[in-house]
Image: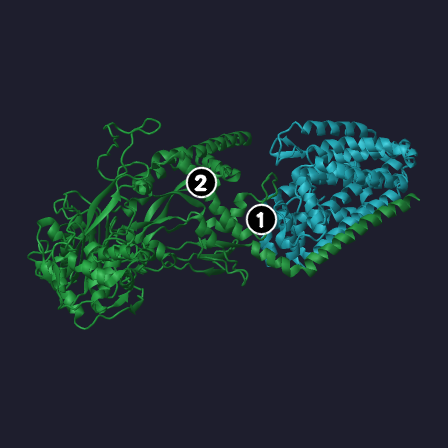
Amino acid sequence: MLKRLREIIYKVLSTRAAWPILICISLLCVASILALELSSPDRADRQRLFITAGTIVLILSLIPHFQVIGRASYVLFGVSILLLVGVLAMDPIKGARRWFQLPGDFQLQASELAKIAFVMAMAWYLRYRRNVRELTGLIIPLMLTFVPFALIVVEPDLGTALLFPLVLYAMLIAAGARFRHMLIIALIAVIALPGAYPLLNQYQQRRIQTVVLRVMGKSDPKQVLKDDYQLHQSLTAIGSGGATGQGSEGAQHIKQGLLPEAYTDFIFAVICTQWGFVGGVVVLLLYLAFFGAAVEIAASTKDPFGRLMVIGLSSLIIFQTLINIAMTVGLGPVVGISLPFLSYGGSSLVTSMLAAGLLLNVSVRRQSKSVGSLESTLR
Amino acid sequence: MLNRRLVVLFILFAATMVVLGLRLGQLQLVQADQWRQEARSFIHRHRVLETSRGAIIDRNGQPIARDEPCYDLAIDYRAMNLDDRWITRAARLRLREQKFTGTRAEFARRLADERTAIADQIDAIPDEVAKKCNMSVLQVRSRFNEIRARIRALRQDRWSNKFVRGDEAQDTIVPTDDELQKEVHDETVAHTIVPAIPDDIAFYFRQNATRLPGLVVIDAKRREYLYNDVACHVIGALRNVDDVALKAGRFDLPNLLSDSDAGNLHGYLPGDNMGEFGIERFAENTLRGTRGVRLTELGADAPSKQIDPVPGRDVQLTLDIKLQHDVQQALLDPNGGLTRGQDGAVHHVALLVLNMRGEVLLMISLPSYDLNQLDQIRTKLMDDERDRPLVNRATAAVYTPGSTIKPLIAAGALTEKLITPNDTITCNGHLFPNRPGMFRCDYYVEYGLTHGPLHLNEALEKSCNIYFFTLGERLGLERLTHWFDLFGLGSNTGIEVPEQDGVLPPKSLLADPQMAKAESIFLGIGQGHVNATLLQIASAYATLLRNGQVVQPHLLAATTPASQQKFTLAPGTLAAIEDGLNRVPRTGTARKAFAGMKMSLGGKTGTADTERDVYDDYGNPLYDDPPVPLLDRDGHPRLDRDGKPLYRRQRRAGADAWFVGYVPAQQPQYVVAAIMEFGGHGGTAAAPMVRETILQMEKHGYLPKLDVP
C-alpha cells in the first residue's frame, strides 16, 4: 500500500503539469496561514490542521484510477443530493441551512461535496456524448444541474448555487457544445432573471441593488448603504494596502477585527492589506497558473471523462475565485462563496484539495486511453 | 478543435482576472490615500468625556445649588437590548465562576441553560427596579427607550454621513447595534435608569448584582439644592431636555481626524438635564459645561488627541441666601404669625429687598416647595390651583397697588406743578360735597371722621384718599398713565426670572371724558386700571428715591444693570415726599407695626381692594367660602336643564395688604416690599413682615445693629 503510494507520488512529481499546481496550492496555503495570523490568529492553528487533512485527502485521491471514481460518480451524486435534502432539516446557522453539525465542533457544508460530485457525474454523463452539439442534447445536463441548484438556492445560498450552471457551461464548452446553443440558453437565463428577482430574499435584492447602484456610479464611498458595511470595510482594507501593503492603518484595521468575515469570505482583502497590489496580483496569477496547468492536463488527456472532469473541477475553482474576488473588490454582489485554498474552513479546503488531487490523478494517468487499461496503469 | 475551446475558456478567465487586477490597481494605487484615510477613521474611537454643571452661589459665595456625588442605578446597554454576544459572554463567565468541568457537549448545554436564565433575569429587571425604586414598570421601560434614543443620537453623529440604517436588520453581516455603539460610547456603556438612589437601595442592588445581570450601580452626580425650598422660585431646577432644545442645539460629536468637523460639544443629548425655570434656566449656557472628546487608536493606551471637557461656570446671585433663609424661617414660624392676615388666617405672601444699585438681596414667595423633591411633587404643584405654589408672587403675579401708589402720584403732581408741598387739600370725608356716598376717605368710612386740611406729608402719613383723589383728578388719565410708565409700571423690569407686565389704563377710557375723570380719581389711590407686581412697585420706589433714575433690578451679580434718568423732581419735593413717608412708621398708618423700632425707616402702607375667583374653572374651591346656591323668586334652588342646582359665580372681595418701605430713612439704601394676598390692612398684615426683615438685615450686618443686640 505504502509502496504504491510512494510510487504514485513519484509519478505525480515526474509529470510536467503537477509542479505548477502543487506550487500554486502550497503558496496559497502559506498565504492563507499568514493572512489568518493577522486577522484571526486562533483560526490559523486550526487552518494548519485543515491543510494537513486536505493534503492527506489529496494524496488519497491519487490512489484509485479516476475511471474507478467515475464509475461511482452517479452514486456519489445521488448521495450528495440526499445530503442537500437532509441539510434543509438542520437548524439554521446565521440564517441559512448549509451545514451539518459534526462531533467536535466541526461542521460539514453539504454543497461543498455536491460541487465535486456534480462535476464528476456531469463529466461521466458527457464523456461519450456527441448529441451535445444538438440543442436537445443539452436538456438532460441542464435538468441534472437544476436539482442541486434548486436545493442550494432554498438553503439559501445563491452564490454557491450559481456555481453549478457556470461550471456546466465551462464543461459544455469543453465537451464541444455549440456556442450558438449556449448563447441561446444564456439569453433565456438573462431574460428569465428579472422574473426570478422577486423570489429573492430582501437582503439578496438589496445586495444586487447595491452593485447596480455602484456600477452606475450612484454611490460614493461616503454614502453607501448599510448593507455595504462589510464591503466598505473590505474596500478600506484593500485600498489601505496600497502598492506594497502593510500600511499601519490597514494592518490595525484588520487586527482590530473591523472587517467582518475577514478569515473566510473576505480573506482576499486581508492579503491585499498585507502585501498590497503586488500581493493581490500575485494571488490572481497563481490562480491563473493553476487553471493554465489544468488546461494543459486536459489538453493532453485523451480520455474524455478525465478531460471533462479536469475542466469541470478547475473551472469550479476559478469560478469561485472570480466570484469571491469580484465581491471583495466591490464588482459583484456579496455572496457566501469562499476563496479556494485561502479561506479558513475545513469543508472548503478539503474540497479544493480533493479537486486538486483529482486533477493530479488525471495528469498521472492521462496517457491511458480507456477503462480497459486500468489494471495495467495500477500495476 | 477541442483544444481551441480550452484556450477560449482560459482566455475568458484571464480576461476576467485582468478586470479584477485593474480594479485592484484603482483601489490600491489610485485611491490608496483615500482608503488609508478611511481606515484611519475606522481604527480610531471617539469617546465622549463628561463635564459638570456650575454651581449657583449667593452674593457671599455661599453655594445654593451644586452637583453632588451620588449613586445612579444604571443598566448595560447591551444587556438592555438582550444582545446575544453580551449574554453569551455573561453565561461563559458564570460557568467559569462555577469552575465548570465537563465535556464539550455538556458545556454547550449548560451554556445554553445559562443564556436562557440570564435572558429571563434581564426580562425581570424592570419589575425589580420598579418595585425597589417606587416607579411603575412603564416608567422604567420608557426610561429604557430614552436610553435607546440617546445611543441612537450619539451613533448618528458618527455614522449619519456614512450609513443609513435600514429597518430590516435581518442580515448577519451588517454591524450589530453593539458594534456601532462601540464606535462612539464605549466608555459609558452603563446608562442611568434611576438617578440618585438612596444608599440602602444602592447596597441592595450591589448585593444582588449576580441575580440582575447588566444592572449596575454607578457613581454619578446629581443636582443638590442646599437650601431646599429657600428662594426656590428664583433658583429654579433641572429637568430632562425637551425636544425644542434638542432640536435647537443637539450634541454633535466632532471628528478629531479632520479639521473641518468641529461638531457641537455644547449641545444636548437625549436624557441630559437642562434648566427648567429660574436662574437654572436663565443662566443655562453659563452653568452648563461643555463635553470633551477623546480620540484613541484601537489597541493604543494613550489618547492620540483630546478636547478637554470644560466644566460649567459658577453663577453668583445678588441674593443673600442666609438672610433669605432666616427671614423665611421667621415668616413661617407658627408662633410668629407673620403670614397671618387681619382675619387670622395664613395667606400667600411675597417679600423682597432691593438695594439702590438694583440688586435683589432677598426674594420670597410663599407657599414654596422643596427643589430637591421637585421631580416627585411637580405634578401636584402644577395641579394646585388653590395655592399655585409654582408662581413667583414677587415678579409673576400682578396686584392692585392701592395706596402704595400715592408717593408716585405725589411725585407726578409735584413735578407737573399741580401742587406744592405747602399747598393744602381739605379732607371732608368724601370728595364731592354733595355726594357723601362715593369717593370716600377710609378714615371717614371707618370712624366717621375727617382729616381736615392736609399738606402733602400729612396726606402720605395718614394715607388720605381725598388728597390723592384730588391729585388724580388734577393729573388726569393721560398724565397718570405717563407717570406710571415712567416709574416702570405695566412693563417688564428686565429681571432674570419670569415676570408679568402688569396693567396700565387703556387708551379706550379717554373716549368718554366722564369715565376718564372717574378713572383718574380712582387711579389716584391705586385702584382701577392699574396693576403691578411687587417688584415693579419696589423698583418704582427705588426710582423715586434715586430722584427719577430707573435702574433695572437684577439677580445675577455679573449683570450690569441698565439705568436711565427718566425724570427729575422739582427741588425740595423729594424731601417733602420722604418726610411724609418717614412719618408713616412713626405716627402714620404703620405706627403700630413699627412701634419701638430704633432703626429709622420710611414707607407706605397699602390696603388694596381686590377680588379673586372663589372657584377655579373646574369648580374646585380656592378659598373656604361656602358655595352660594342661586334661588328663584319663591326661594327654591334654581336648577339647570339636567336638574343640577346652580350656584352663584362668586368672586371673593378683600384687600391685599401692602407695605413698601426703605431703610435707613435719612439715606435710603434698601427698599423692602411685602404683600399679603387678602391680608387686610397693610399696616397690620404687611408691615410686620417688613419689620422682621429689617431686624434680620440688622442681624446680618446690612444695617447698623440698633434694634438687635
Write down the quadrant of residue B280 in the picture.
Answer: bottom left
Taking the spot 83% from the left edge, 29% from the top edge, the residue there is A71
Is B69 left or right of B458, judged from the image as shown?
right
Residue where numbered disc 2 is placed:
B144
Instruction: Find numbered disc 2 in the image and state the secondary structure of the residue it sits on.
Output: helix
Is A319 left or right of B295, judged from the image as shown?
right
Q: Position of residue B473 (x, y in %)?
A: 22, 60
Residue where numbered disc 1 is placed:
A257
Q: At label 2, which amino acid type do we have?
A: Phe
What tint does the image give chain A?
A: cyan
Instruction: Find numbered disc 1 in the image and state the secondary structure of the residue it sits on.
Output: loop
Q: Position of residue B353 (x, y in %)?
A: 21, 58
The answer, for residue B211, to whether it is visible in the render is no
Please identify the quadrant where the N terminus of chain A is shown: top right
Q: Position of residue A88 (x, y in %)?
A: 67, 29
Residue sitting nearer the eye, B390 or B41: B390
